[in-house]
Amino acid sequence: MSTIQTTAYVEQWRLPRQVAAPEGPVDVKMMYVMHHAFRRDLVMFAEAAAVTPADDRETWGALSRRWQVFSEILHHHHSGEDAGLWPWLLEVVDAGERATLEAMEAEHAEIDPILTACRTGFERVTTATDPAAATRLAERLAAARDTLLAHMGHEESEAMALVQRYMTQADWDHVVESNFDKKVAPKLLLAAVPWIAHELPRGAADELLAEAGTPMKLIWLATRRRFERLDERATRHVR
């Protein structure tokens, strides 16, 4: 494992709603791209749930399908951090910095219960006749937005600073390949490509697709309209 780095810095990406991008030698733009998509969805779900009529089953069904995509990708993302990134850093940080990583682990422990509670809420609002089910789900989604936005801001400002302090690009790439890339099921990949690119600033999306290569661009071209149609149905009362 590496020690504190003294190599040249790389330019870090700053995307809408992003809280921080600590300087350092490691290109972590995919982390920020994922956070951009998570933030976009969290804001969207809270806004849509607040204005969608309780009896509009079609829109709630579309929101439920959008939530399934979001929640599966978020579970994969935070599980990869739990399995690979935090353990790697815990081996090299000092006693004071361990508190940051322990906080990351504690905040991550809240994520799956949040996802489960919201999934249950979607099941109830799409099958029940009780109008209060929609109100309760809207409250859960607003709480999920607030909790997860705060966590991502904490992660960007403090945990990513530790990544830049201790890791090399090779270290980062190994953790990503072993704990994220190799564990993506084909079905999840097909869902994730258009989801990631949705509403990503044009320059960032073009650069990301160019780096990803032809296979990812073909997946995006083949899946983007289906995803966009689902998003349009899910947010019909917002836009």
Image (tube, rainbow, N blue to C red):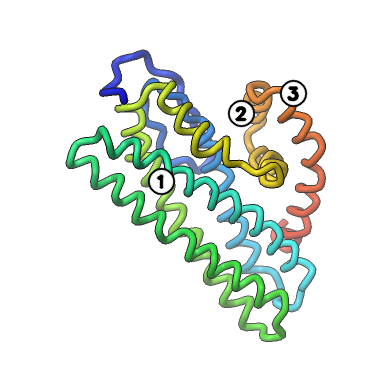
Residue drawn where x is 64% and y is 70% of the image: 122
Q: How busy is the neighbourhood of tag 3: few (under 14 within 10 Å), some, or many (20 plus)?
A: few
> Could you say which disc has been placed on residue 153 in the image?
1
| Nearest-to-viewer mark from 3 and 1 | 3
- Residues at marks 1 and 2, CA–CA distance in whole angstroms: 20 Å
Residue drawn where x is 74% and y is 27% of the image: 215
Of residues 134 and 5, the one nearer the viewer is 5
Quadrant in which residue 10 is drawn: top left
Q: Which residue is mark 3?
A: 214
Q: Position of residue 133 (x, y in %)?
A: 62, 80
Q: Position of residue 165 (x, y in %)?
A: 30, 27
185 to the left or right of 177: right
Q: Earlier in the sequence, mark 2 or mark 3?
A: 2
- Residues at marks 2 and 3, CA–CA distance in whole angstroms: 17 Å
Q: Amino acid at mark 3?
A: Thr
Residue drawn where x is 67% and y is 86% of the image: 130
Q: Are marks 3 and 1 in contact (CB under 8 Å)?
A: no
Q: Quadrant of the C terminus?
A: bottom right
Residue pushed farthest top? 8
For numbered disc 3, what is the local secondary structure? helix
> Could you say which disc has been placed on residue 204 in the image?
2
| Nearest-to-viewer mark from 2 and 3 | 3
For numbered disc 2, what is the local secondary structure? helix
